[in-house]
Image (cartoon, grey):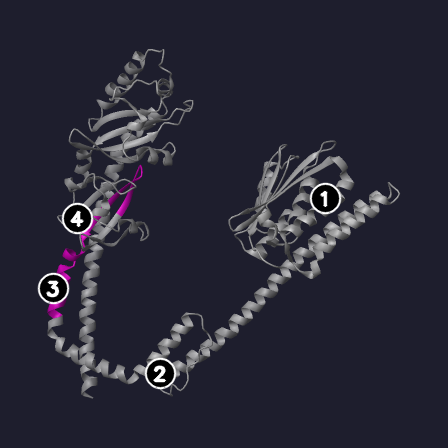
Amino acid sequence: MTVIYVVFAVLPMIFVTAYNYIQTSRILQEKSYQDMQQNMETTGKSLETFFESYSTIMDLLYTNQMMYNYLGIDYTDVSYGEMFYYTDRQLLHNTLSLFPSIYRIRFYSDNATLPRDNYYFYQLDQLTGDFQEKADRKAGSAVAGGIVKEGGKRYAGLIRKMNYYSSGGIENYLVILVDTQDLREWLQQNSGSRRTYLIEEGGQILAASDAEAAGRRLSGFVPEWRRLADCGGSCVLEQEGRPVICMALNVGMGMKLIMTEDQESLLGEAEAVTRKILAIFVGSSLLVFGAIYLYGRLAATRVDKVVYAARKLGDGQFDYILRDMGGDEVGQIAEAFNLLNERIQILIQDNYEKKLLIKSSEMNLMQEQINPHFLYNALSVISSMSMRENGKRTVECLRYLADFYRISLNKGREVISVEEELDLLKNYMKIQKIRFGEDVSIHYEADENALQCRTIKLVLQPLVENAIHHGRREEETLQIDVRILRQNSRIVYEVSDDGLGIEPEKLVRLRTELKQSQEGFGLKNVDIRVKLHYGEGYGVKVESILDKGTWVRVEIPAEPGQL
């Protein structure tokens, strides 16, 4: 009774203290988060406004066709005085004089004949660091390249690839250098424990509330700063071995604004109050822990069995049974656990069997659509032929049809080898050649590494049949190319033709039907069967140009081995 009394006396105190600490910490954190967010938004808007003028300048130079023409001229036998005069007038008088924070505006070019004055014009190989790579990735958009050091000072470099007009294969890049001191003034409006950094996409610090941080990597201050992208832009990280509240905000041109607040100093008051309360009932807590320990030792064996069984359940072993667990609370938990395992096994078995039956029924239904459809078309050909000639070609056509169904039926199996799938197509084409003669020509290209892999049957034949039915022009030869490739872990079927092609509206409708797995013959049937058998990651892709032809691609996983 004494132990129970102590437990019930101490526990409320622990809960009250913990609740007080948690609530105080939460309030302080919320207040700090709100203040940081307001500070981030204000600073971010200021920086966006600051950089908006530079973006406008870069836009004007990016679309300046006259400047493009000057950068692309072969100056071997041409005077460049007019170019320097135009550039100086555009930049020095119209731009640099209006924006004193801009240190330089430069052009980097691989035009070997372009004069280099190392003031406005530079060789492309003089471009600092990985500026060019960043500009190429943005494909014509402005991006922060990093820090440039000149004359003992640091400048933030903004770069943009000049690809708005054609330059005859010549690559030109526009770079604006901005004084980082102007940027730093926007970042110093914070409390003593708060630090602010402006970084480019690679993590190099362009400007910071601490002047010495510019030009260094943010990872040297906040090693795990990239985790901000995974936690919604704000989380608790470490800075110089101390936990800090960290926030990030995109400010354009590939730049981020990072702000940190020392969490320990923020929570110092709450921790001080908590320590005083804890000192009052440490002794009582020790008694509580002792009571918990004694009770735990008594129930340890049976609790360990329940924990072990739960781990087995988590590992997917649903047939583990707890035995001899008694009739108290732990025993009742064990009994409920055993009942849960039994029901899970029954549900898994029922669900698995139902899925197999549904999938098998759907596959059989789609297969039953193709065989009668093909047989009807083939018999129509044979019937028409038999009325035109004495029977020799009819017999030949019937033999090809028999060969086709010998492979297609495959003793009721759905899966055949890729080589047999190709033979199916060839037998089908023998029948079509008898029908169409030289009006249809087909070329086969098969990767030997793919032929022994397994595939569901009747994938290629509907694709080729679709090409003949929809692509053939009257009195012209339709050329069909069939390719079977093995690309890493996939088998790729490609069927292309030079026929009529598909109208854009119809092509959009066809792709929508394929995406929605709507029922039908030909391409839609193949797409549904492939997805049913192999999953949604596989299926049919169609490209077509009207009056040029159609290209169909089907991918399935490469499954080598015996059938």
Mark 2 or mark 1, which has the lower sequence index? 2
Look at discs 3 and 2 and give the one toward the viewer: 2
Mark 4 Cα within 10 Å, few/some/many (few <14, many 20+)?
some
Look at discs 2 and 1 and give the one toward the viewer: 1
Q: Are marks 3 and 1 in contact (CB under 8 Å)?
A: no
Q: Classify mark 4: helix, strand or loop.
A: strand
Q: Name the residue under label 1.
A: 429
* Three-letter code for the amino acid on which mark 1 is drawn: Met
Q: Mark 3 points at which residue?
A: 272
Q: Classify mark 3: helix, strand or loop.
A: helix
Q: Where is residue 367 in the image (x, y as percent from the top left)?
A: 67, 56
Q: Distance between the residues labelled 4 and 1?
A: 76 Å
From the viewer's perspective, is 483 left or right of 316?
A: right
* Three-letter code for the amino acid on which mark 4 is drawn: Arg
Q: Distance between the residues labelled 4 and 3?
A: 22 Å
Mark 3 or mark 2, which has the lower sequence index? 3
From the viewer's perspective, is 449 left or right of 175?
A: right
Q: Are marks 2 and 1 in contact (CB under 8 Å)?
A: no
Q: Position of residue 493 (x, y in %)?
A: 60, 46
Say if residue 76 shows up in the picture. yes
Q: Point out which mark residue 103 bears.
A: none
Q: Classify mark 1: helix, strand or loop.
A: helix
Q: Are marks 2 and 4 in contact (CB under 8 Å)?
A: no
Q: How far apart are marks 3 and 1 (CA)?
A: 87 Å
Q: Point out which mark residue 330 bears.
A: 2
Is 266 magenta? The answer is yes
Q: In this view, does 167 lie above or below 262?
A: above
Q: Name the residue under label 4.
A: 194
Q: Where is residue 157 in the image (x, y as percent from the top left)?
A: 26, 32
Q: In this view, does 293 lie above or below 514?
A: below
